[in-house]
Amino acid sequence: MNKRFALGAIAALACCAIGAGAAIGNSTSNSGLRDPIATPAPDTAFGAYSSLTAVTAAGSRLVAVGRRGVILASADAGQSWQQLPSPVSSDLTAVQFVDAQHGWIVGHDAVVLKTTDGGKTWERKLDGHAALALLNASYGPQGKTPDDAIAQDIERAGSQSATPGVLPYPLLSVWFSSANEGYVAGAFGLILQTRDGGASWTPMIERTANIKMNHIYAIGGDGGQVYLAGEQGFLRRLDDTTGAFVPMASPYEGSFFGLAASQSRLVVHGLRGNAYASDDGGARWRKIDTGSGANIVAALPVSAAAGAGLLLVTQTGDVLESSADGSARPYSGADSAGADNRRGQPRGEVYGAAIAGGALVATGMAGASVLRSVPLSTP
């Protein structure tokens, strides 16, 4: 499959360090069209019914993101939603909160947004203008880490951008271990790290052994370990000694869309109902028999007392519970009593899911839906 076509389909699902602020873009491009990077998202009364690509828990609240820069929050477990101000109108693809106050969003045009007040306000910490300059400074002929192949790919991407001077690659995943230290990654092997809360960024493309420039769909970690998962069975683990991401034996040649990592267990999931678990950091894998042929879009840890360990959510809205022995079965939690979700069904294709306030909430093509009640809290 053509990589750019595949990227569009999945995104609809959803060592040079320099400051990002210097190259943040203007409100209009040279063509006179408004630059989505510098154009705030439009107000909408129908955000909860529009295409939402991702959702996450932010303390007891939920925060969801979607097309045209839309950011929404729910304080009542997905029953109602409020639009939050967004400084961009680029499509947004992923969101993560480290705690109730500190959160990050990534999206198209290499956009990275940060909040320190629970989502009330968002600040751009990186965008396609700054990212293109950063990559050129790192991998170009005069860069600190010259790489002809990477430089040529960046030049090609820049020449094909609809907005001159903007890196058109979407960021598809974000993971922070603390308020200041984390990673963003996405299309064609793009990956950057920050150690100062987004004030500066270090490209790590050459440190991922990603010769095919596979898309990176997921980042995650726990207990000091960091993992990457992506296209064509792409799996990597951070080597603390070298500071590089090293290949892991992959149990599957198809794409992985997500991962869930804990100190005792690593789960990766993706195309056609495929999910695999490892108890030794990816040295050995066992297949989770999901019994589903639908793409798995989320893996959500729940407390051991809930009897599940992990809830798997598919693109069709099915919810499976997977126990430590690797078995999986339909989740038996009570359905929501919401008027639109009496049977716990999403309004359309599901792109992401999260748990907050005792509810499992999905986001997708037709907005947000409450899928199930989750009576016991997450870890």
Image (cartoon, rainbow, N blue to C red):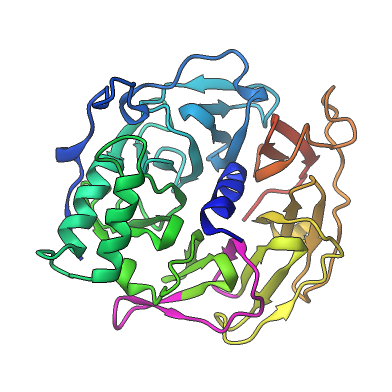
Pick the residue in front: 222 or 365.
Answer: 365
Q: Where residue 317 sits in the image (x, y, percent)?
A: 79, 45
Q: Is residue 197 left or right of residue 97?
A: left
Q: Where residue 104 sits in the image (x, y, percent)?
A: 41, 43
Q: Where residue 155 sits in the image (x, y, percent)?
A: 27, 55
**Which residue shows up at 65% across the image and 69% down it?**
254
Q: Where residue 184 sits in the image (x, y, percent)?
A: 39, 54
Q: Residue furthest bottom?
A: 283
Residue 272 position (above or below residue 69): below
The C terminus - image quarter = bottom right
Q: Quadrant of residue 311?
A: bottom right
Q: Residue furthest left?
A: 142
Pick the residue in front: 166 or 51.
Answer: 166
**Which residue shows up at 59% across the image and 13% down it?**
45
Residue 226 position (above or below residue 311): below
* Residue 126 seen in render: no
The N terminus - image quarter = bottom right
**Which residue shows up at 70% across the image and 39% down it?**
362
Q: Quadrant of residue 137?
A: bottom left
Tell me where the magenta segment starts and ends, as one range: 237-264
